[in-house]
């Protein structure tokens, strides 16, 4: 995967994070079960999906379950076999962690002890990588 493609995937992560944030602030303020809030956030976000992020990436769905929020992306031009998963993870993970820990869009997840997964699938649906971050990662970064 070229540097250009990694940059595009990084941009997709930021956009996906922003997309989910529109409802996070209001939903996480309510005094109800946090997992119900995450489920509702995923349901509301999924109404807008799938969404083409760029020429390489599509945000297909989100899942809110067990104090975890998951963004599921597809790299639309690449199959599992065409991507060096280790290189992608090595290049993308620090950027995703930085976004998770420092973005105002992610602050409500961090403040409410929500783990966030960024799952990337190949064009045939096979998972390439899953980047998972939790609030304790921010203290160590």
Image (cartoon, rainbow, N blue to C red):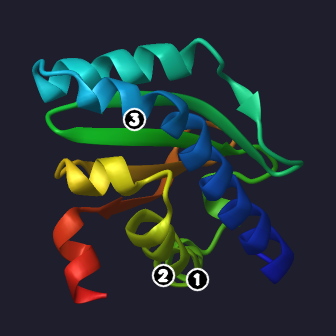
Is there CB contact under 8 Å for labels 1 and 2? yes
Q: Quadrant of residue 84?
A: bottom right
Circle 1 is placed at which residue position?
91
Instruction: Say what secondary structure mark 1 lies in.
Output: helix
Is there CB contact under 8 Å for labels 2 and 3? no
Q: Which mark is residue 5?
A: none
Residue ranking furthest to the bottom: 141
Query: Mark 1 packing: few (<14 Cα in 10 Å), some, or many (20+)?
Result: some
Query: Mark 2 packing: few (<14 Cα in 10 Å), some, or many (20+)?
Result: few
- Residue drawn at point x = 19 percent, y = 47 percent: 112
The residues bearing labels 2 and 3 have C-alpha atoms spaced at a distance of: 25 Å
Q: Nearer the viewer, residue 35 or 91?
A: 35
- Residue drawn at point x = 43 percent, y = 54 percent: 106
Q: Which mark is residue 25?
A: 3
* Residue 97 in picture, x, y percent from top left: 42, 73
Instruction: Say what secondary structure mark 2 lies in.
Output: helix
* Residue 132 in picture, x, y percent from top left: 32, 60
Considering only order in the chain, which callout, 3 or 1, is on the residue closer to the N terminus?
Answer: 3
The residues bearing labels 1 and 2 have C-alpha atoms spaced at a distance of: 7 Å
Instruction: Say what secondary structure mark 3 lies in.
Output: helix
Please state which of the two labelled residues, at mark 1 or mark 2, is closer to the viewer.
Answer: 2
- Residue drawn at point x = 16 percent, y = 72 percent: 136
Please state which of the two labelled residues, at mark 2 or mark 3, is closer to the viewer.
Answer: 3
Considering only order in the chain, which callout, 3 or 2, is on the residue closer to the N terminus?
Answer: 3
Which quadrant, please, contains the C terminus? bottom left
Circle 2 is placed at which residue position?
94
Residue 112 vs 6, above or below: the answer is above
Which quadrant, please, contains the N terminus? bottom right
Q: Nearer the viewer, residue 103 or 39?
A: 103
């Amino acid at each position: 995967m070229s540097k250009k493609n990694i940059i595009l995937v990084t941009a997709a992560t930021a956009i996906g994070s922003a997309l989910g944030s529109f409802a996070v602030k209001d939903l996480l303020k309510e005094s109800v079960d946090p997992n119900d809030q995450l489920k509702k956030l995923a349901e509301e976000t999924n109404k807008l999906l799938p969404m083409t992020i760029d020429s390489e990436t599509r945000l297909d769905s989100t899942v809110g379950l067990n104090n975890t929020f998951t963004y599921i992306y597809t790299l639309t031009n690449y199959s599992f076999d065409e991507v060096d998963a280790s290189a992608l993870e090595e290049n993308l993970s620090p950027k995703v962690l930085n976004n998770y820990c420092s973005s105002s869009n992610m602050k409500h997840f961090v403040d409410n002890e929500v783990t966030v997964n960024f799952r990337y699938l190949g064009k045939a649906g096979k998972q390439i990588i899953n980047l998972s971050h939790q609030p304790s990662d921010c203290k160590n970064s």
